[in-house]
C-alpha cells in the first residue's frame, strides 16, 4: 500500500531526520519527498511504500502521530487513493 | 503528486468541513416474509444484523485510511408497508424490530418505514400510515417516508389529507421533545429508490439484495472556493462550483467502491447533494450569500440556488459511474446556520423556501411551524410541494415540524445534526374545503410521453 505522509508545523532542526528515522525503523520506503515553507510553516509531503513493513496501517499511523506530538508538528498519513481520485482524471 | 494539491485536500478536510456524510447500506427484505408477524419481524432483524454487521467497522476503517470523516452509517430497507402487508394490524412489531437492529449495529438511523401510495392505497397501506405516529414515538432511530405523488400517477390527495393528520399526531405524541418525531418523517413526490439521506431513505423494490449508496457533503468547501474568486462573474462562479463538486464526488465514489469491496455489496450510487450541518462554515445559505446576497431569501436567491444546483450536478456527473439519490443542494432550515439566521432576521420566508424547492433538491425541509397549524393547512402545504415536483418532473418533499405548544417567536431544538429552528410563519387562511374534497389530481399532460 502506498500512502501520503504530510508534516506541518513550526520549522526547526531535525524534522526530516526524525521522520525518516521512524520510517526506516518501520521498514517503510520513501519514494518521493517534497518540502517547502507555506505561510511560515514547515510543510513536507512524502509518498511512502508500506508493503515491506510488518506493521499494519493503524499501528504505523499511531507511531507517526506520537512522533508528531514529540516534535510539536502535525503528522498525517493517508492512503494515496484519496489524493489520486481528487486530483487526477 | 503535487504538494499544493495534497494540501488542498487536507485543507478541505481540516478546515472546510469536507466529509462523506453517509454510507447507507440498502437491504432487501422481501425474502424475510414469513407466516406470522412475529416470525417476519425476527427474520427482518436477523437479516439486517447479519448483512450490516460490518458496516460501522468498515466505515471507520475506510475513514482512518483515507483520512476523511464518514459521519453517518445507515441502513435503508424495502418499504415496511410491503413487507408487513399480510399483518396490517401489527406494523409496530416491524418498527420495533428495525429500531432494535439499528441499536444492535450502532448505526445512526434506519430508513424504510415507508409506503408508496402515489396513485392509491391498499387497506394495509392505510393501516400502515396510521401506525406511523406510534412507530416514531416508540422508536428512536427509525425513519419514515410516504410517497404521495408522482409525475406518472398524479397526486393522491386522500393520502395527503391523511399525512396532515399523521404529522399533527406525531407532533403531539413527541411533544416533550419539541415534536421531534416529525423530523424523522418525510412526505415525498417522485421519491427515489436509492436515496442515502435520511429521513427519506428506503430501499426500492427494483434494487438488488445489498447495495451501497454514498452521500457526500461539502458546502464549506464550495464557499471557500468561491471566496477565492471574489471578482469573478457568474459564469466563473458556476465553473468553480463544478470543479469543486467534481473533487468532492470523486471521494464519494472512492469511498463507495471501498465499502462495496469490504461489505460484499453492490455499488448503487453516489448522491451529489450538498448537505449542510448547523455548524459555522458548513452552510448552503452561506454559499448563496457568498455569491452576493445580503441575506438568504433576498431577491436573486432562487436564481443563485438554481445555478448552484446545476453546477453541482455538472461537476459531479463525470466523477462517478452512477449518480442518483437526490443529487442537488439541500436547503433544510434547522440544519443550516445560514437558513436559521435567514428565518430569524426575516429575509427568508416559507413562501420563498417553496420557490427555492422548484430549482433544487429536495423540498420544504426541517421547517418548524406553529404547533396550532391545522392538519388541513399542512396537507395544503404538502399538496403545493407535490405539485411543484409532479409538474417539474423532480423529487420534492415536505418535512415540517408543527412544534406542539410553540408559536412565532419561539425556537425548537432538535439536537445534533438536526439542529434548531425559529418557528416560521405559515399562511393562516384555510384550505380545509379543498383538502376535504379528496380524490386524485390527474397526472400532468407531459407525463404522457409514450
Image: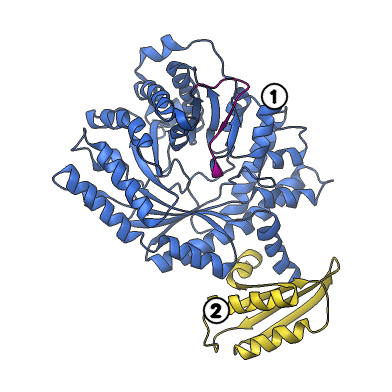
Q: Is residue B393 above or below residue B22?
A: above
Give me the chain that's yellow.
A
Residue beneath disc 1: B346
**Which stretch appears magenta?**
B405-417
Q: Name the element at disc 2.
A: helix
Residue B190 in which image quadrant: top left
The numbered mark at residue A59 is: 2
Q: Name the element at disc 1.
A: loop
- Distance between the alpha carbons at the discs numbered 1 and 2: 53 Å
Is residue B428 in the magenta section?
A: no
Q: How far across and how far down the image is residue B288, in percent? A: 71, 39
Q: How far across and how far down the image is residue B127, in percent? A: 26, 29
Is residue B414 in the magenta section?
A: yes
Q: Chain of mark 1?
A: B
Give me the chain that's blue.
B
* Residues packed near mark 2 inside 10 Å, few (<14), some (14 to 19) or many (20 plus): few
Q: Is residue A67 above or below residue A54?
A: above
Q: Residue furthest left?
A: B35
The residue positioned 72% from the left and 51% from the top of the image is: B240
Amino acid at each position: 500500500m502506498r500512502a501520503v505522509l504530510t508534516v506541518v508545523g513550526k520549522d526547526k532542526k531535525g524534522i526530516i531526520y526524525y521522520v525518516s528515522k521512524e520510517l526506516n525503523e518501520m521498514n517503510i520506503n520513501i519514494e518521493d519527498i517534497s518540502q517547502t515553507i507555506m505561510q511560515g510553516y514547515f510543510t513536507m509531503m512524502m509518498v511512502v511504500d508500506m508493503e515491506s513493513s510488518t506493521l499494519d496501517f493503524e499501528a504505523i499511523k499511531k507511531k507517526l502521530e506520537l512522533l508528531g506530538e514529540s516534535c510539536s508538528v502535525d503528522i498525517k498519513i493517508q492512503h494515496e487513493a484519496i489524493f489520486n481520485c481528487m486530483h487526477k482524471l | 503528486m503535487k504538494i499544493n494539491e495534497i494540501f488542498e485536500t487536507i485543507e478541505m478536510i481540516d478546515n472546510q468541513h469536507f466529509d462523506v456524510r453517509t454510507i447507507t447500506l440498502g437491504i432487501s427484505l422481501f425474502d424475510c416474509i414469513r407466516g406470522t408477524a412475529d416470525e417476519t419481524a425476527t427474520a427482518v432483524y436477523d437479516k439486517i444484523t447479519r448483512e450490516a454487521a460490518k458496516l460501522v467497522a468498515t466505515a471507520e476503517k475506510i475513514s482512518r485510511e483515507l483520512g476523511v470523516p464518514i459521519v453517518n452509517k445507515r441502513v435503508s430497507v424495502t418499504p415496511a408497508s410491503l413487507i408487513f402487508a399480510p399483518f396490517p394490524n401489527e406494523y409496530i412489531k416491524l418498527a420495533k424490530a428495525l429500531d432494535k437492529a439499528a441499536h444492535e449495529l450502532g448505526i445512526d438511523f434506519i430508513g424504510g418505514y415507508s409506503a408508496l401510495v402515489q396513485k392509491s392505497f391498499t387497506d394495509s397501506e392505510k393501516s400502515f400510515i396510521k401506525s406511523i405516529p406510534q412507530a416514531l414515538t416508540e422508536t428512536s432511530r427509525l425513519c419514515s417516508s410516504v410517497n404521495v405523488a408522482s409525475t406518472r400517477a398524479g397526486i393522491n390527495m386522500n393520502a395527503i389529507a391523511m399525512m396532515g393528520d399523521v404529522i399533527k399526531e406525531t407532533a403531539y405524541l413527541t411533544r416533550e421533545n419539541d415534536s421531534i418525531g416529525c423530523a424523522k418523517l418525510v412526505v415525498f413526490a417522485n421519491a427515489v429508490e436509492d436515496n442515502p439521506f435520511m429521513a427519506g431513505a428506503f430501499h426500492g423494490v427494483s434494487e438488488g439484495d445489498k447495495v451501497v449508496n454514498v452521500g457526500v457533503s461539502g458546502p464549506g468547501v464550495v464557499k471557500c472556493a468561491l471566496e477565492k474568486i471574489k471578482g469573478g462573474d457568474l459564469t466563473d462562479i458556476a465553473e468553480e462550483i463544478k470543479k469543486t463538486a467534481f473533487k468532492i464526488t470523486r471521494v464519494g465514489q472512492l469511498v463507495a467502491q471501498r465499502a462495496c469491496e469490504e461489505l460484499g455489496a453492490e455499488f448503487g450510487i453516489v448522491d451529489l447533494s450538498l448537505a449542510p450541518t448547523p455548524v459555522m462554515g458548513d452552510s448552503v445559505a452561506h454559499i448563496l450569500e457568498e455569491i452576493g446576497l445580503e441575506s438568504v431569501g433576498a431577491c436573486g436567491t432562487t436564481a443563485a440556488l438554481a445555478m448552484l444546483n446545476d453546477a453541482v450536478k455538472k461537476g459531479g456527473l463525470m466523477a462517478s459511474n452512477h449518480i442518483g439519490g437526490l443529487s442537488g443542494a439541500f436547503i433544510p432550515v434547522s440544519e443550516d446556520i445560514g437558513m436559521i439566521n435567514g428565518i430569524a432576521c426575516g429575509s427568508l420566508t416559507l413562501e420563498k423556501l417553496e420557490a427555492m424547492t422548484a430549482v433544487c433538491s429536495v423540498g420544504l425541509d426541517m421547517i418548524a411551524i406553529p404547533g396550532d397549524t391545522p392538519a388541513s393547512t399542512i396537507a395544503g402545504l404538502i399538496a403545493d410541494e407535490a405539485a411543484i415536483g409532479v409538474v417539474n418532473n423532480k423529487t420534492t418533499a415536505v418535512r415540517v415540524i408543527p412544534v406542539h405548544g410553540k408559536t412565532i417567536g419561539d425556537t425548537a431544538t432538535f439536537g445534533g445534526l438536526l439542529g434548531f429552528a425559529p418557528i416560521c410563519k405559515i399562511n393562516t387562511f384555510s384550505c380545509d374545503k379543498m383538502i376535504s374534497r379528496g380524490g386524485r389530481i390527474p397526472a400532468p399532460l407531459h407525463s404522457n410521453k409514450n
